[in-house]
Amino acid sequence: MNRFQKWELCLGIYENRADINLQRQKKFDEYCKLKMNAKTTDDDKNEIMKDINRTYQEMGLFHQESNKNIMCNVLLLWCSHSLSYRQGMNEIVGVIFYTYVQSFQDSQEQNSTKIENDIYWVFKTIMDDGDHKQNFNYSSHMPIDRIPLIRYIKDLTMDKLKYIDEQLFQIFEQNQISTEIFLMKWIKIEQIQVIWDKMFEKFQTSKMKFLDAMIITMMIQLKPQLLKIEYINNFEVLLLFQNYPAKDNYLQMIGQAEKIEKQLRQLEGISWLEIIKRFNLGYSLSLYFQKY
């Protein structure tokens, strides 16, 4: 079984391997019906294709027009039945497409619709069942601090990093580091695949929560360098990304993330009273109630 097939099973797209050909045919028939009923425009396609043309351009695979069309069609279909297209969706479908091609490189499959079908269901499951769709649910007029993905990373820092590594949390707070920096594409596509392997293994029990632990781990990887900097600012943090320490030790990083994930699960079971005690929030709360 190749990587793409393992992803399909881990994500629950196919229940088992016993009658997978029958299940796959049903999914294909459903995909064809969705595609037939989809309402798309040239403007929709042009908007998506702008980002597809910028997706992983360091790899020749993503230069071929036929491959670009496959990724574009997947996004067009999902967006026609769900949210409007948002920048960043192209990166997700790009990883899925790359994994498909890599997994079936010896296959003679030339039917682009069947390839689109397989990629579509993986993308749809990540977005819908993995609750990742909510990160793209915003309008172009929304203030940047209200954009879900920006709020997600800020909440992750405020609520969870503080619990895992309070010293690092204080470094970010005192130096007013923009946590959006950690949304940058900071590792290679091959490394993303390995991280997704682990994330999808846990998908049926914890959805995308392993991602929280991975991002916190990414932050912690920078801590030794941050402690050496006399005046920490956003520019210095960006410079660190040019030689990100996790690029060559991402397997070790995944192991660290698994430990952090266990700590985060413990956090979910802690009462508010215990959180107040641990984070020394009692004094701050007393001042708040005195004020109001």
Image (cartoon, rainbow, N blue to C red):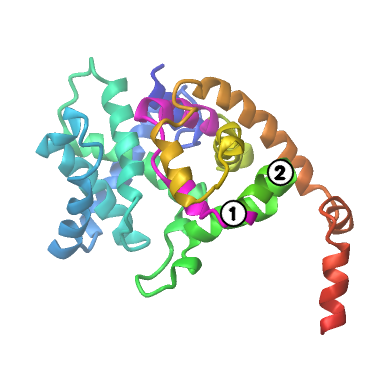
Q: Is 191 inside the magenta-drawn segment?
A: yes
- Crowding near the residue tagged with mark 1, few <14, some 14–19, many ≥20 C-alpha atoms within 10 Å: few
| Lower sequence index among marks 1 and 2 | 2
Residue under label 1: 175
Observer able to see residue 120: no
Residue 148 placement (x, y as % from top left): 49, 61
Residue 37 placement (x, y as % from top left): 24, 59
Q: Nearer the viewer, mark 1 or mark 2?
A: 1
Q: Which residues are magenta?
A: 174-200
Q: Nearer the viewer, residue 68 or 70?
A: 68
Name the residue: 32% across, 47% down: 30
Farthest front residue in view: 230
Q: Nearer the viewer, residue 18 or 139?
A: 139
163 left or right, relative to 66: right
Instruction: Specify the quadrant that holds the N terminus.
Output: top left
- Crowding near the residue tagged with mark 2, few <14, some 14–19, many ≥20 C-alpha atoms within 10 Å: few
How far apart, in angstroms, are the residues tagged by discs 1 and 2?
A: 12 Å
Up/down of 42 relative to 288, above or below: above
Residue 117's image quarter? top left
Farthest bottom residue in view: 292
Name the residue: 40% across, 22% down: 3
Residue 246 placement (x, y as % from top left): 49, 27
**Residue 167, which numbered label?**
2
Residue 63's image quarter? top left
Q: Main secondary structure of the magenta part?
A: helix
Badge 1 marks a residue whose secondary structure is loop
Up/down of 102 relative to 28, above or below: above
